[in-house]
Amino acid sequence: MTTKAPKLPKDKVWLGVTPTLWWNDDFLTIDIGIPFGQCVSEMALAGFKGCSVGHKYPTDPKVLQAALRLRDLRVSEPWVSTYFTIEAMKQQTIDKVGAQLDFMEQFEAGWDDPRRADLVVAEFGHAVNPLPVALFPNCPVFDNAQWQALAEGLNEIGLLAKNRGRKLCYHHHLGTGVMRSESVDRLMALTDPDVVHLLLDTAHLAAAGGDPIALAKKHASRIKHVHLKNMREKVVKEVHAKGWSFEQGIEAGIFTVPGDPDGSINSYPELIDILAGAKFEGWLVVEAEQDPAKANPLKYAKIASDYLHHLLGW
């Protein structure tokens, strides 16, 4: 299936990239010392217009705005890990959401630009992806009470985000209780579609055994943010066979970028068609947690950017 460009409007859809090509924000030893300035300069050089926030970024919103504005970059998404399924963490999670919303309001202050950041969240209660344990056999399975707590918590912070003019987008993630297609379906059924949206991550779903196209068709109206990521099926099989952790999978190259012929996902044209049919507006973000010592970040950023600009027709 081919996409006749352009199907997504350039003035309402923007390409972003995460700094996880340049360093890893979860596993800090996956790092060759690339500084913030080089990272965001290479993002802009590769043709991107936005980025997520990494641990090397300035924490002063005015300093960050100046650095990104110089490169015509915006923030596509701040991240909040939620902890609604474990004890005594609800208020801390809500407070963190409030702090991120405050930060983004300060960052975007005085900047007349339609490219606003979405708030991206994922439930990390009982998650095993940060741990040095076998990834797939140890993924949590929520009970009914935990599902209810998660849905109620997401509805609450989703309303908080909406009241402050921002979309809350839920990121299904390997190693968490919302990883497989059926868990995404359940989350969508339990949450309020007016305040909880879906971040579709192509590689996280495919690596978990799901079909990104089938999920996109089912929940097209809920998708408000997309992570365009590719994965290597041969590495996924090794993670299963050898009982590797998420970190070991990353180091072995489980993820790569769209446009890399070594990747196993080839359905991006069909995904763009589905998004266009749903009148998608917002961020399409390239993400590929890779070891920069093995995968040159600028090279892979350009591979992804060139491929997506060709696919989108702009």
Image: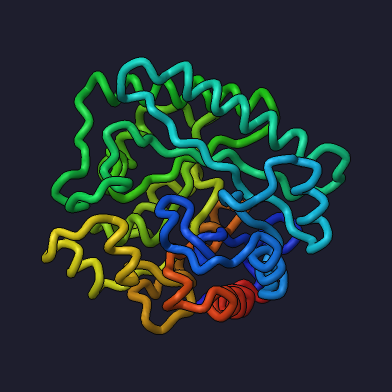
Q: Relative to the observer, which residue lies in front, 291 or 308?
A: 291
* Quarter of the image that includes the N terminus: bottom left
Q: Where is residue 84 in the image (x, y as percent from the top left)?
A: 37, 24
Provide residue 248's location: percent of width, then percent of height: 27, 62
Question: In the picture provided, is 281 more to the left or to the right than 246?
Answer: right
Instruction: Give residue 9's position: percent from left, percent from top.
Output: 70, 62
Residue 165 shown left or right of residue 274 in the figure = right
Residue 203 appears in view? yes
Residue found at the far bottom of this picture: 261
Q: Residue at x 61, y 42 (%)?
A: 118
Question: Residue at the location (22% across, 30% down)?
Answer: 142
Image quarter for residue 36?
bottom right
On screen, residue 100 above or below 2:
above
Q: Examine the rendering and report whether any part of residue 228 can be seen.
A: no
Give the quadrant of residue 102. top right
Determine which quarter of the picture holds residue 242.
bottom left
Relative to 217, say whether 146 is above or below.
Answer: above
Residue at (83%, 37%) from the top-left corner?
109
Q: Is residue 306 left or right of residue 147?
A: right
Residue 231 location (% of width, % of height): 35, 69
Q: In the displayed image of the protein, which residue is found farthest to the left?
A: 241
Of residue 287 and residue 40, the one placed in the foreground of this image is 40
> Which residue is rendered at x = 27% and y = 23% of the image?
146
Instruction: Tell how many labels.
Output: 0
